[in-house]
Every structure is written in C-alpha cells, then in structure tokens.
Image (cartoon, helix red, strand yellow):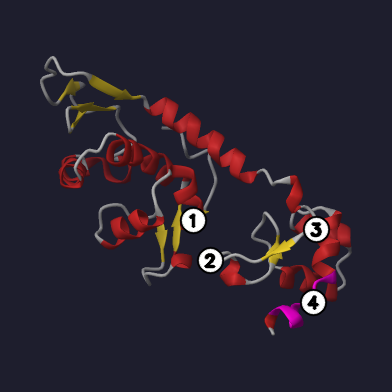
C-alpha cells in the first residue's frame, strides 16, 4: 500500500467518523492491545491518541470484519496474532476474505490461501477499494460546511473544549494572539490556510472572557 504519500494525523473522533468504528471500540481495542494508534502518549486520554492514514485503512477493514460481517472478536485476535509478522501492516498488506465466520487470507510470503475454500460463499474485501474510499472520506472531512464560515463553536474533545472557528480545530485564542502580535488578517490566513476573512473577523470579535465565565 502506497500510503506513505498520504500525510495526516487524525484524532480519535475523526478516526471513529472515518472508519465507522465507535469511540468505545477504539478505546477498548487500544486498552486491550488489539489495535493501537500509531501515535500515543500512553496516558489513556482522548487527546493522546492520534491515528495515521494507514490506521484509518486498517480500521475500515476491521469495521467490515467485526461490525458488518460479525466475525467474532476472539477470532480476529487469532488472525492478528497469525499475521503478526506483517507488523502494523497486518490488516493492509494482503487481501482478506470471509468464509463463514472466519477470516481467510493470501499469505504474501507464499502466495497461497491459508484455508481450503469450501462451497460457502467467500466475501472479498478489495484493499484497493478500502484505500480509495478512505482517501475520499478524508477529503470529505476536510471540506467545511458553508454554514460554518464566520461562526465560532465549542465541542467536547475539540481543542480541549476551547472556542474554535466552526468546522475547524483552530482556537479563537490563537487567532487573537496572532492579531495581538501585529499579524494582519491576511497573514493570519497564511498561518491557517483553511480560514476565511469572515472566520478571522468572527474570532477577533469573540469575547473569550465572557465564554469562560
């Protein structure tokens, strides 16, 4: 998988949204050592879990296996152990199949399918399709709703509940700090390319003191 060209770091909320794996599952899988994000401060707090693009692809595969095809979690653990030699790429290095309630795979070392296929239907999970759909989901995430332009919002787990420019993770306080340092609106927009003039104006007008009260 040529995912090294994809640069991205995604919060656990974004990872959950992009993969359809619930936050509860993400945190449980991390705590149990089944699937951990590529970057973590190991403190067990939401802000400490950062997922890579490869993680998102893996999670979408796991969502298909666990949540859609209802493969038992115990069996997925066995599959993970069986593919441990592939490291972090264990869910993305080969095409996976479902036979009944078991996972079948093509071993990249031998090019052989590691289970005899019976008359039961086999569901293919084409990796190229998963990668392509993940890219599309990431691009969609990056597009802001037009209703967000020029608005300020707060959301749990976004910038530690600080007021941010709606549809982004840019804190209002950061915009105001840049302005106080003498940055023009245009220069602030260069620091945060996703912001519009309306966004900067809204951030500068926002009363942080009242919001904190």
State whether residue 14 is above or below residue 86: below
Tag on residue 207? 4
Crowding around mark 1 (Cα neighbors within 10 Å: few <14, some 14 to 19, many 20+) is: some
The reply to whether callout 1 and callout 3 are in contact (CB within 8 Å) is no
Where is residue 185 drawn, in percent x and y? 87, 61
The span picked out in magenta is 205-211
Q: Where is residue 166 in the image (x, y as percent from the top left)?
A: 70, 58
How far apart are labels 1 and 4 at the CA level? 27 Å
Label 2 packing within 10 angstroms: few (<14), some (14-19), many (20+): few
- For the residues marked 2 and 1, what is the alpha-carbon distance in whole angstroms? 8 Å
Q: Which mark is residue 199?
A: 3
Q: In the displayed structure, does residue 181 sit left or right of residue 55?
A: right
2 or 4: tag closer to the N-terminus: 2
Disc sitting over residue 13 in the figure: 1
Within-10-Å neighbours for mark 3: few <14, some 14–19, many 20+: many
Residue drawn where x is 20% and y is 46% of the image: 73
Which of the 4 quarters of the picture holds residue 114?
A: top left
């Amino acid at each position: 998988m040529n995912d090294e060209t994809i640069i991205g770091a995604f919060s656990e909320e974004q990872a959950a949204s992009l993969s359809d794996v619930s936050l509860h599952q993400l945190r449980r899988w991390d705590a149990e050592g089944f699937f951990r994000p590529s970057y973590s401060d190991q403190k067990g707090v939401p802000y400490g879990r950062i997922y890579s693009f490869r993680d998102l692809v893996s999670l979408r595969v796991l969502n298909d296996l666990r949540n859609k095809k209802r493969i038992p979690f115990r069996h997925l653990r066995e599959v993970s152990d069986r593919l441990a030699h592939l490291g972090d790429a264990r869910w993305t290095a080969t095409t996976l199949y479902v036979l009944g309630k078991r996972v079948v795979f093509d071993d990249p070392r031998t090019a052989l399918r590691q289970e005899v296929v019976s008359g039961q239907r086999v569901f293919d999970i084409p990796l190229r399709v998963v990668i392509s759909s993940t890219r599309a989901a990431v691009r969609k995430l990056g597009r802001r709703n037009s209703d967000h332009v020029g608005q300020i919002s707060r959301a749990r787990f976004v910038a530690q509940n600080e007021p941010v420019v709606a549809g982004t993770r840019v804190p209002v306080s950061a915009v105001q700090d840049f302005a106080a340092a003498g940055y023009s609106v245009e220069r602030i927009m260069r620091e945060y390319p996703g912001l519009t003039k309306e966004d900067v104006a809204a951030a500068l007008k926002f009363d942080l003191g009242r919001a904190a009260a």
